[in-house]
Amino acid sequence: MTEATSLSLLQRLRARHDSDDWARFVALYEPLLRHWLRRREVLAHDADDLVQNVMSVVVRRVPEFEHNGRTGAFRAWLKAITFHCVRDYCRARKNHPPGTGGSEFQGLLHSLADPQSDASRLWDEDHDRYVMKQMLEQLRDEFEPVTWRAFQGFALQARPAAEVARELGLTPNAVFIAKSRVLSRLRQESAGLLDE
């Protein structure tokens, strides 16, 4: 394994501006941000502008990001950037507010600022669930198909190792190893983005 692949995606982004790593990051986060904004009734063109604003700030500021060791540090950092971009966007368009549900959306902004609010908890859950799913999809091609199917059957579908092993012509131990290999690579790649 090369030094580049032994570093997490976040570490690689902070260390250099590699277009493949940025493309991977954008593919991971743009849909999440857009989905999150659209679910809060932000009009599509406003959501596109906001996502672009957020990604622009992230590109500029990610080299400065320092993980403080707290669970969810990156997602909190991203949430803060998103909050500030949305707030600034709403202020700039005060006379032409985006389709944001008016005072309801303003209430959402205030609740996002509170780390104990339901909106913040939902942000955290959406982030972790989505990023893990997408990162697994990005990593899938790094594994032999049988390894991936063993991982999927045992870890994602929660089927018994013996059943998965029989189906794939493996030993139960090989199924455990497949799960371990995939999760190890996921932990490595997602370090700093997802916290255990």
Image: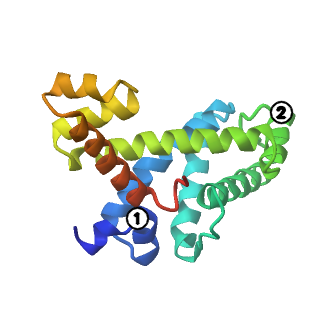
Q: Position of residue 11 (x, y in %)?
A: 44, 70
User: Which image quadrant for residue 21?
Assistant: bottom left
Q: Position of residue 72 (x, y in %)?
A: 63, 56
Residue hosting label 1: 8
State the scheme by which the image is colored: rainbow
> Mark 2 or mark 1: which is in front?
1
Query: Dot 2, crowdedness within 10 Å: few (<14), some or many (≥20)?
Result: few
Q: Nearer the viewer, residue 101 or 39?
A: 39
Residue hosting label 2: 104
Dot 2: element: helix
Is 70 positioned to the left or the right of 149 in the image? Answer: right
Q: Position of residue 59 (x, y in %)?
A: 51, 67
Residue occupying image coordinates x 76% and y 48%: 90
User: Which image quadrant for residue 16?
Assistant: bottom left
Number of numbered markers: 2
Is 162 positioned to the left or the right of 127 in the image? Answer: left
Q: Which residue type does callout 2 highlight?
A: Glu
- Going from N to C along the chain, the mark reached first, 2 or 1, is 1
Residue occupying image coordinates x 48% and y 45%: 131
Residue occupying image coordinates x 83% and y 33%: 104
Q: Position of residue 42 (x, y in %)?
A: 67, 35
